Image (cartoon, grey):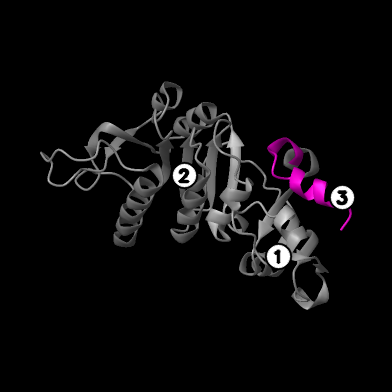
Amino acid sequence: MTKAEIQFVRSLADKRTRDAEGLFLAEGEKLISEILASQLPIRKIYSLRNDFGGCAEIVSSKEMERLSQLKSASQCIAVVEKPRWQVPATADAKRLSLALDGVQNPGNMGTIIRLADWFGVEDVFCSEECADCFNPKVVQATMGAILRVRVHYVDLAALLERTAAEGTPIYGTMLDGENLYSSEFEPRGVIVMGNEGQGVGEACQRHFSHRLLIPAYPADRQGSESLNVAMATGIICAEFRRRMTKH
């Protein structure tokens, strides 16, 4: 590899370069195989061995260590074109969507996208303050879900306002909310999850039609102050899907 090639691949760790080039990095044989099957265009594959039908460029272990964004370099890395999703003006009233207000930890972001894929949530709407879904750490944490879930970066408060105006339920996860398991609600609409430290901002809160709480057990026990946002997302999505099977 030339020095310029290595520098270019490494530059894709930076969001500004990813945005300017319309590219992202994917590491690992399983993920790259999924991308090939999805027909998302791949610009280049670098590998330690002659795999992927001979379409990969063979590199040395030292070169792979310089290319990799992981603590332990993988066997292969690909430069991939970002999927281009059309951003809807509102969330679909008949389906379940997720909205993330300021979720900044790459691990949380990746896990939430993976959860969305597991629970059949096709659209995730993110405020501009959220972690970039094409950050290498996020891509890795999605375990391939980034290929199937449409992630949109929007003015979240404005999208929620337009969606609420159509009569679509907007569910906010709040510490002063109603018990998730005893509340009456339709298992459709938008579930809004907040920032790891601050929760959901005021601008988004004003569009909530329901405020929900995952109750601690037992209710009077002095335990953790709150749940990790990705863990909370999994619990809430599971309850929404459970209710959907009853309808």
Is residue 11 shown left or right of residue 190? Answer: right
Whether residue 187 appears in this view of the structure is no
Q: Is residue 178 above or below residue 28?
A: above
Q: Secondary structure beneath disc 1?
A: strand
Q: Earlier in the sequence, mark 2 or mark 1?
A: 1
Q: Report the quarter where the N terminus lies.
A: bottom right
| Residue bearing mark 3 | 3
Query: Closer to us: mark 2 or mark 3?
Result: 3
Image quadrant of residue 145?
Answer: bottom right
Across and down, in percent, residue 226 comes to 29, 38
Label 1 Cα crowd, 10 Å radius (few <14 / some 14-19 / many 20+): many
**Outermost front residue:** 62
Closest to the observer, 164 or 28? 28
Across and down, in percent, residue 90 comes to 55, 37
Q: How far separated are the C-alphas under marks 2 and 3? A: 42 Å
Q: How many marks?
A: 3
| Residue bearing mark 2 | 98
| Residue bearing mark 1 | 76
Closest to the observer, 109 or 148? 109
Task: State the predominant SS element of the stretch in magenta.
Answer: helix
Q: Report the quarter where the C terminus lies.
A: bottom left
- Determine the residue positioned at 68% across, 65% down: 32
Q: Which residues are magenta?
A: 1-17
